Image: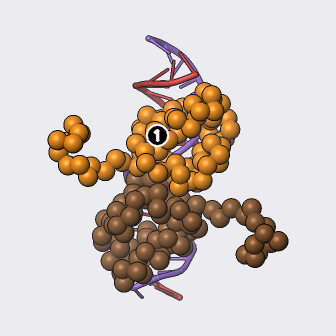
Chain colours: A orange, B brown, C purple, D red
DNA sequence: CTGTGACTTTCAGTCCGTC
DNA sequence: GGACGGACTGAAAGTCACA
């Protein structure tokens, strides 16, 4: 058993989970609160919270806003 | 002159445009029609067409379906 | 086989408040 | 500062007819 997440070692982490992880760590690296990040990308505070908790299926245009607010390219937010 | 592709070197291509380009080329590499790709990822033929023409703001879950149907990771569809 | 506008249904995204 | 619930509005999903 490689790990406990099921049986297969090739288990694919959902794009939502990867995104959430990346957003949280990039945000914390900058010492920002969810509110501060929301302000920077022009989205709502609760929406950013939902994305970080994998509770929302974010659309591409907003993924792009999030990326630029965090100072990275859109594809970097989805890279594991 | 840094480079030759126009005037501005800092021009950011929209995530939609990058996605469209990548989907079209990966699809053609496989010799698939839009209909075939739509079937593979469980989406509608016209929806795929709209994405390829940058006419839709696709959400993450569908981006993921598209990626796996094309045999790549989600972030690779957004990499320029 | 593909492009496109239009349409209905579902949900992304906002805003309120409470713990 | 962050998790979470409810209610609302606008936009994405999904489909179709026709070019």
Residue A59, horizontal then vertical, whole percent: 51, 52
Q: Secondary structure at mark 1?
A: helix
- Give above or below for D17 relative to A6: below
Residue A37 is drawn in which quadrant?
top right
Residue furthest right in the image? B1
Left-right relation of A12 to B59: left
- Give above or below for A51 relative to B60: above
Residue A55, horizontal then vertical, whole percent: 42, 38
For image coordinates 41% across by 76% down, the residue present is: B27
Q: Residues within 10 Å of mark 1 (few under 14, many from 20)?
A: many
For image coordinates 46% across by 62% down, the residue present is: B76
**Is there any visible trace of residue A21 in the rendered image?**
yes
Q: Nearer the viewer, residue D15 or A67?
A: A67
In the rendered image, which quarter contains the C terminus of chain B? Answer: bottom right
Residue B45, horizontal then vertical, whole percent: 38, 73
Residue D4 is drawn in which quadrant?
top left
**Is there any visible trace of residue A35 in the rendered image?**
no
For image coordinates 60% across by 53% down, the residue present is: A73
**Total count of labels:** 1
- Give above or below for B3 relative to B16: below
Q: Nearer the viewer, residue A26 or A63?
A: A26
For image coordinates 62% across by 42% down, the residue present is: A70
In the rendered image, which quarter contains the N terminus of chain B? Answer: bottom right
Q: Which residue is mark 1?
A: A20
Residue B41, horizontal then vertical, whole percent: 33, 66
Query: What chain letter is assigned to the residue under label 1?
Result: A
Q: Nearer the viewer, residue A66 or B45?
A: A66
């Amino acid at each position: 058993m490689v790990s406990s997440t099921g049986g297969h070692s090739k288990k694919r982490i959902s794009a939502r989970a990867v995104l959430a992880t990346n957003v949280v760590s990039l945000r914390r690296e900058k010492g920002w609160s969810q509110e501060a990040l929301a302000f920077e990308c022009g989205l709502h505070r609760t929406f950013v919270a939902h994305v970080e908790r994998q509770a929302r299926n974010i659309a591409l245009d907003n993924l792009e806003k999030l990326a630029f607010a965090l100072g990275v390219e859109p594809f970097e937010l989805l890279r594991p």
